[in-house]
Image (spheres, rainbow, N blue to C red):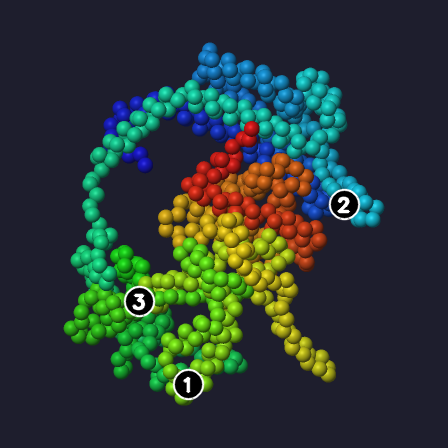
Amino acid sequence: MMADPSTLGRSAVDALHASPGAQYLNRAHARTFSLNILEMNALELREAVIRAHDAELSLDLFFEKNREASQQAHREISRHLHNFLAAAKTLVDHTRALVAEHYDGTPLQTAYQDRLNAGPGREPVVAFIHDLRNYMLHRGPPGTSMFVRFDRNDPDTDATIKTGIHLELTSLAAWPKLSARARQFIADKGDKLDFRQFVDDYLTHVRALHAWLDQELETLHREDLIETARLEAELEQRGRGMAPPSLPNPETASVERFQWSPEHARAIDEAAIKLVSKIRALRFAARPSPSFPSQRHAAATITPDDLVDTPVFTGQDADGMRVVAFIHTDTTPYGLAEDDFSGVATLADLVRETPWAAQSLGQSFIQQTFIIWARSAFSGSDAESYSDALSAAARNTVRTCRVLAPVAYLEVQSAFQLGPVAIEPLGIQLIEDFRSRGGEPSPEQAADVDALLLQMERDFVGHAAIAIELIAEPHFAQEKALLIAQDCVALLRVFCPESIVAALLCPMALMGAEIMPSSKLIVLSENEASLTDSLLVKDIVHWRLSDAARERIMEQGLALAGRLIAIEGLTPFALDVRASLIRFSQGLTSPDPLVRLTQSFAALEAILLRHSVEPREPSVARRMELLFQSPPGEPGGVGETVMRGYALLKSPKVGPLTSSETDLLGALAAYAQPALLTALRNIERFPTRSTFLDALDEPRA
């Protein structure tokens, strides 16, 4: 970050701003605005045309009752065409003015004019676009026509309905001011023209010209840019030299486990004492009577005799304030206002600034230790400091924990390592280990223990589990392991072979979190009653991962996905890909195909959009075409399929999907996963999403 110019003297700042390199960069930045206006208007025109070519969306426009909607569709196409043509001529004029003003009489101006004459200036489509702009400016919008066609290639199959919109060329061809090249273009095309054809052709020539111009300008200004970089570095160095020296942070200093630096211990104790000073007597409001008696079965009734520790109770006091009570005398409860009690979470954050505490202690452990210490401190007994109490509690509790998280609907042939975790098959040995570690039960408990072990065998044996080893207090080890295992399963689920089949549900998840939609219906008639309990999804995937299949998906990218389980040290692009894969994976567990589609698009947007301001739908469609090397705007191609998918999400849907909608979802599912895996395989090559998209957007030879 550059230092504040006001502190560095105007001369250095002025020299930087006045340097030829900085002035060139400013001009280059300004030119991107004109280019962007053209690109975005082209995208919006293509999007409108694609909607007209989607029979599912536009067929209704041919009915008389929808005449106004049909006319508005023509108006919108004309509006987008006008904006595209105006932007095309704007870019031409801005570029010509740039070259004339700043490079007049130079070899660059000569080279630019030669390039125009030999390239775009000779292309009929360029002349057509420029003449069409003049026609629309001086005569009005050209005609457009929508069509519907029924194609039957085989007499034994149903006809295919096709719709679309064309630009009418008859009136334009009769215009006397039309140039010879534009007239030849129209003669070659006939009396009707697909908008996408001339838009894409024109953009191809424009992008090639400006890529050439960028390269020429950078070469011309190479020495200027080097000098500007030197001035920036000099200015930055001055800024660093004037900054106050940084002081060592005691909280980050190396300390042994279960100990604190003196400064950190003092800060922890001061925060804890401040919280204790706010403890006060509480008077709870009377509990309101229920508005009506409940018929629900009470699972358990707890009495004071059942409590093994002083309870922590949250409720509303007589003044209507939310309070937390955790100290109880014979007659009076004591505690903190809920806002004050939130300071315990702040205290936990302070504690966890020491590395060993962040790795080993959870917020609930720190909170519970504070409550126990606060009871003693509030009573006035000669208690130790909170930092010492916490160290002692941690020393007695932190241990090496091996956490196994069983996975539903996953079976593996043998154990394997995936990043920082292991994926292991669960066998009968798990039950034996559980029995041996628990000790011999009493005769009264033996039957219950045997029943528990039998249930564990039924639930777990034959499934896979995520195995994670952590050094932490047990509750925090469980919390951390749960989060790690959830992400691990999500990343693994992406590689399930059925992830590219839209019709299949992939319920693989940590056991107990799997989504298996079912229905329970009670039917009562005059002479009978029935209870129906059934699954709502028939096609369910149980993934049996053999060693051979595992090796194949390791090569496809699973090994790289394993590196994304722990986020420490990941580049910004790797983090984007990680979030994208997890988002896509979450959709695979949904029985609703439109939810799955929504998640798939969200995942693609996370890697294919530069920022939230970029137009979502056309940008994702265009970059999917680039990823799959599909011709821009190809009927039935990946770009058009993506646009149809977005349109499906935006249209109100009542009732089951049609067969064509089901086919569309199948095509999108087959595209989404390979696109995401392409990004995954590039996490080591590109540090940021922008560099990845720069390479993707780079014009191909």
Q: Earlier in the sequence, mark 3 or mark 1?
A: 3
Q: How many marks?
A: 3
| Mark identifier at residue 125 | none
Is 161 left or right of 402, judged from the image as shown?
Answer: right
Image vertical order of residue 613 relative to residue 27, above or below: below
> Distance between the Cα atoms at labels 3 and 2?
67 Å
**Is 657 in front, or is 465?**
465
Q: Are marks 2 and 1 in contact (CB under 8 Å)?
A: no
Image depth: mark 2 or mark 1 in front: 1
Where does the image place residue 678, in percent across and percent down from the top left?
52, 44
Tell me if I can see residue 627 in this picture.
yes
- Identify which amino acid the numbered label 2 is placed on: Thr
For mark 3, give the secondary structure.
strand
Image quadrant where residue 50 sits: top right
Q: Which residue, given by chain and number where applicable, does mark 3 sit on?
A: 399
Q: Earlier in the sequence, mark 3 or mark 2?
A: 2
> Distance between the Cα atoms at labels 2 and 1?
70 Å
Q: Quadrant of the N terminus?
A: top left
Q: Are marks 3 and 2 in contact (CB under 8 Å)?
A: no
> Distance between the Cα atoms at labels 3 and 1?
28 Å
| Mark identifier at residue 160 | 2
Residue lying at the far top of the rendered structure: 105
Q: Which residue, given by chain and number where applicable, does mark 1 sit on?
A: 445
Please report the residue visible at 44 percent of the width from the left and 40 percent of the height from the top: 686
Where does the image place residue 471, in percent across and percent down from the top left?
32, 63
Tell me if I can see residue 267 in this picture.
no
Dot 1 crowding, Cα within 10 Å, few <14, some 14–19, many 20+: few
- Identify which amino acid the numbered label 1 is placed on: Gln
- Identify which amino acid the numbered label 3 is placed on: Arg
Is 409 left or right of 390, judged from the image as shown?
Answer: right
Where does the image place residue 369, in percent across and percent down from the top left?
27, 69
Residue lying at the far right of the rendered structure: 155
